[in-house]
Image (spheres, rainbow, N blue to C red):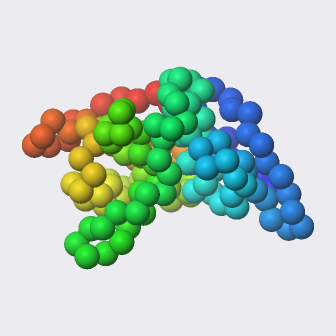
Amino acid sequence: MQLPKLNFEDHFDFQIKRDKDKFFIYDLVRRTWLLLTPEEWVRQHWVHFFHLKQGRNLSSLILEKKLLLNGTTKRIDLIVTEKTVPTILVECKAPHIKITEKTFEQTARYNSVLGAREIILSNGLHHIYAKFNGEHYSFLPFEA
């Protein structure tokens, strides 16, 4: 399986295995093997980034949390918490998915329920980073 090189400064040592014609990646947070989809490839880079580069405990990372938004169940890719309070919402897209204003608005709607101070929207190649000040988002440069 040819995986794209993503836009992260560090190289992470992932555990990947093959079973017949499918590939799986080991998830440090859930301690299990997951089907290696393009979106999962991006999400696992962020898990390793927060844990290995920023030194956050694995217990501060919440993956694929369900969220109720306007009566519909949605799934948040990654939440970084501090003392169980959501601080960073990370929305992951597959590398071939273009990051647009519409995808940011989707993430901001999720955050209207969650209430994190920061949002990262990433397809692994491009990262959008925004801080919420209570009224609007400020977009800032971000190095992964």
Most extreme residue toward the right is: 20
Q: Nearer the viewer, residue 125 or 113?
A: 113
Q: Quadrant of the N terminus?
A: bottom right
Horizontal and vertical percent for residue 46?
54, 40
Is 6 left or right of 32, judged from the image as shown? left
Q: Is residue 119 visible?
A: yes
| Picture mark count | 0
Is 109 left or right of 81, judged from the image as shown? left
Is 97 left or right of 104, judged from the image as shown? right
Horizontal and vertical percent for residue 78?
46, 48
- Residue at 61 percent of width and 49 percent of height: 30
- Rendered view: 108 above or below 75: above
Q: Is residue 88 visible?
A: no
- Residue at 70 percent of width and 53 percent of height: 32
Horizontal and vertical percent for residue 115?
24, 47
Q: Quadrant of residue 71?
A: bottom left
Most extreme residue toward the left is: 135
- Rendered view: 83 above or below 20: above
Horizontal and vertical percent for residue 52?
60, 27
Q: Nearer the viewer, residue 95 or 25?
A: 25
Is 75 left or right of 112, judged from the image as shown? right
- Residue at 30 percent of width and 31 percent of height: 140
